[in-house]
Structures are given as C-alpha cells and as structure tokens.
Image (cartoon, grey):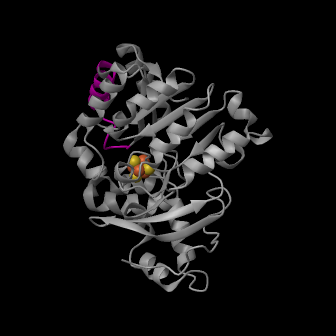
C-alpha cells in the first residue's frame, strides 16, 4: 500500500470551478485494479456560480470506475494528472501513482472518496446563511454531475447514502440523482423518507438496451437490463424516475429502431420522462473516445473526425433531427421530456 507524507497538507489540486481546497490523504484500499484515496474538501455544495448552470451540484467521489468511453467528466482527473507531473508540488509517491497511467485511465482506476462530505454538508445546511438561500427557495441539488454516486465505491464507503441522510433532515429541497447503477435501490427507504417533505427525482442513464453494445462502450457499467429493473423498483417505491439517454452516439446508438425499443422499454419500466442529447466531445473526452472509435468502430473513424473537426458538437442538422425523433418517440409511448430536471 502506498503511504503518503502529504496527509494534513493543503494541496490546491483543482481549479476553482471544479473543486476548492482539495486535500489528499492516504489510500483507503483497493478493489481489483481500482485504488481508492481519501480526500477532504472544504466545500461540498457547488453553487450555480461554479456549476455555470441553474443548479447546485454534489459529487461524493472524484473519478468513476464505470469508465464509459464517452465520459465528459474526465477533465477533473486530467487536471490532477497535470499537477501531479509537477514534482515540486506533490509527494513522490503520489506523483508516481499518477504517472503510471494516462489521465483518462486514472479517472477510472484512481478514485477519490470524499469521506467527510456528509459532515461538511450537514454543517453548511445547519449554518444556513445567504449563500444557501437559493436551496430553500427551490434551486435543484444535482447529485452526480461529474461522477456516478452509486459506482462500486459506494457499496463500501456509503458517502452518497450519508449525504442523503443529511438532506433528509431538511424539508423543502429539490434533489436530483443521476446514476447508472441499480445500487440506488439499496437506498429506497431513504429516498422515500426524503420524498415525504422534499422533491426527489432519479435519472437513470441508459443509452442502449443492447447488452453486447453496452459492454463495448460502457465496459464496466451495470447491464441495461439491471438498470431497467432499477427503474421498475423505484417506480414501485413511488420514487419519480426518468432516463437520460445521453449521449446518443452517432452511428452507434442512434439507429431509429433501437431508440424506439429503448424508449418503449423505459416507458414500460415506469420512467416518467426521458431526455436525450447527442455526443459532445470536449478535449479530455476526445482523447479517450476517438482512439476508442478507431479501434472498435474503424468504419466510423473518418465520419467522427469530420463531424467533430470544428468543435465539441456534432452538426446542427443532426441534433435537430435527433430532437425531433425523440419528440415523436415520447408522444408514441406517452413519456415526458426529461431534458430539464
Ligand atoms: S457513469 Fe457517468 S461519470 Fe461514470 S464514467 Fe460513465 S458517464 Fe462518466
């Protein structure tokens, strides 16, 4: 096990818009090829001014062992890795830990666990103050904007559950949880308790119901069938649940018949809404995704390079056609629009 001399020392690893006052602590353990590190952060609730969106975000972990090939959240680890290359700023043990693999892989295999996030959140909500007035006035708290809060780490560290226990103490909140994992059904008791006095909504991420295809593009994520079963269990428990079909991968998951089947099955499982958008490729996602396409879908490589040559978005015409197709499918299967929470 790697020992760090850096315990107790403040290391500003993330830019302000990602994470403030991040501190690295010793390893918590290993699980196969995944290694967990403890972290402490001064602030857990990232307000609209830092998310750049109209919601607050809470991320119990940094990194995500599900390792979806298209994941856009890798940028945070890229920053960690770049800083790790600066040996004057980090201890040798930690530097070599991160130098042993590319940033995109470290995102999946080196997971930071915010063990004290629930206590920090409890203190922030107890103290209240002007900064948190928006929460009381109905701003949404999104759990899982840059990590999956129910990835394998949660089974062991239960940070997400403890965060929900804190939120359960505060009535009148609006909470959205995004996950790919049926592990969320472990917390149905807590979700029901929160639903008594706050709005709580779960979005299950699902971009294909084809098990083999899912295994190629989301190799470590729960199977589509297990996610459909989770939707049904949440529905049975009275928890409002929707689906994020995000991102739709051009040429891979956008076959009209396949999308029809997906929308039909999530509607049958009990999802009340579905949102969809086409793949966006920021720099960190591009570094992982485009080599993956070249290797796994070589016939599509030229199309991807051309489609994303001018920016992070695929062409306007494609996006408009996709939006129209989903409108048709929602109407066909009587399911609402989940593009906004
Ligand atoms: S589950 Fe979400 S956060 Fe995790 S790797 Fe996949 S897309 Fe990224």
Q: Is residue 50 above or below residue 53?
A: below
Q: Quadrant of residue 34?
A: bottom left
- Do we see residue 47 in this rendering? no
Which secondary structure type mostly characterizes the magenta part of the structure?
Answer: helix
Region in magenta:
249-268
Q: Is residue 62 magenta?
A: no
Q: Is residue 137 above or below residue 178?
A: above
Q: Is residue 273 above or below residue 4?
A: above
Quadrant of the image containing the N terminus: bottom left
Q: Quadrant of residue 238?
A: top left
**Relative side of 265 to 60, left or right:** left
Quadrant of the image containing the C terminus: top right
Q: Position of residue 156 (x, y in %)?
A: 35, 53
Q: Position of residue 147 (x, y in %)?
A: 47, 50
- Do we see residue 257 in this rendering? yes
Q: Is residue 282 above or below residue 222?
A: below
Q: Position of residue 210 (x, y in %)?
A: 22, 38
**Relative side of 35 to 133, left or right:** left
Q: Is residue 254 magenta?
A: yes
Q: Position of residue 226 (x, y in %)?
A: 25, 36
Nearest the eye: 269 or 20: 20
**Relative side of 295 to 110, left or right:** left
Residue furthest to the right in view is 130
At a point 60% along the width and 69% down the height, the residue shown is 13
How many marks can you see? 0
At a point 27% along the width and 53% down the height, the residue shown is 219
């Amino acid at each position: 096990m790697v020992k760090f001399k850096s315990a107790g020392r403040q290391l500003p690893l993330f830019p302000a818009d990602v994470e403030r006052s991040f501190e690295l602590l010793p390893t918590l353990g290993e699980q196969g090829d995944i290694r967990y590190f403890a972290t402490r952060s001064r602030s857990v609730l990232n307000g609209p001014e830092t998310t750049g969106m109209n919601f607050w975000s809470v991320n119990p972990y940094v990194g995500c062992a599900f390792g979806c090939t298209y994941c856009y959240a890798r940028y945070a680890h890229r920053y960690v890795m770049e800083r790790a290359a600066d040996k004057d700023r980090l201890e040798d043990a930690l530097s070599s830990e991160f130098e042993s693999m590319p940033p995109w892989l470290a995102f999946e295999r080196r997971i930071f666990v915010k063990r004290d996030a629930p206590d920090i959140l409890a203190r922030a909500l107890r103290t209240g103050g002007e900064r948190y007035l928006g929460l009381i006035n109905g701003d949404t708290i999104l759990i899982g904007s840059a990590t999956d809060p129910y990835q394998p780490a949660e089974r062991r560290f239960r940070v997400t559950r403890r965060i929900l226990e804190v939120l359960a103490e505060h009535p009148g909140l609006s909470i959205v949880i995004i996950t790919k994992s049926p592990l969320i059904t472990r917390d149905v008791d807590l979700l029901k308790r929160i639903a008594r006095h706050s709005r709580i909504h779960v979005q299950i991420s699902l971009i294909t119901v084809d098990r083999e295809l899912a295994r190629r593009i989301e190799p470590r994520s729960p199977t589509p069938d297990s996610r459909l079963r989770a939707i049904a269990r949440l529905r049975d428990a009275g928890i409002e649940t929707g689906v994020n079909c995000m991102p739709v991968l051009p040429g891979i998951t956008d076959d009209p018949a396949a999308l029809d089947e997906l929308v039909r099955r999530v509607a049958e499982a009990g999802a009340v809404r579905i949102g969809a958008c086409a793949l966006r490729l920021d720099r960190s996602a591009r570094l992982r995704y485009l080599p993956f396409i070249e290797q796994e879908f070589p016939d599509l490589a030229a199309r991807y390079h051309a489609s994303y040559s001018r920016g992070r978005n695929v062409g306007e015409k494609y996006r408009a056609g996709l939006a129209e197709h989903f409108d048709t499918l929602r109407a066909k299967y009587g399911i609402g629009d989940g593009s906004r929470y």
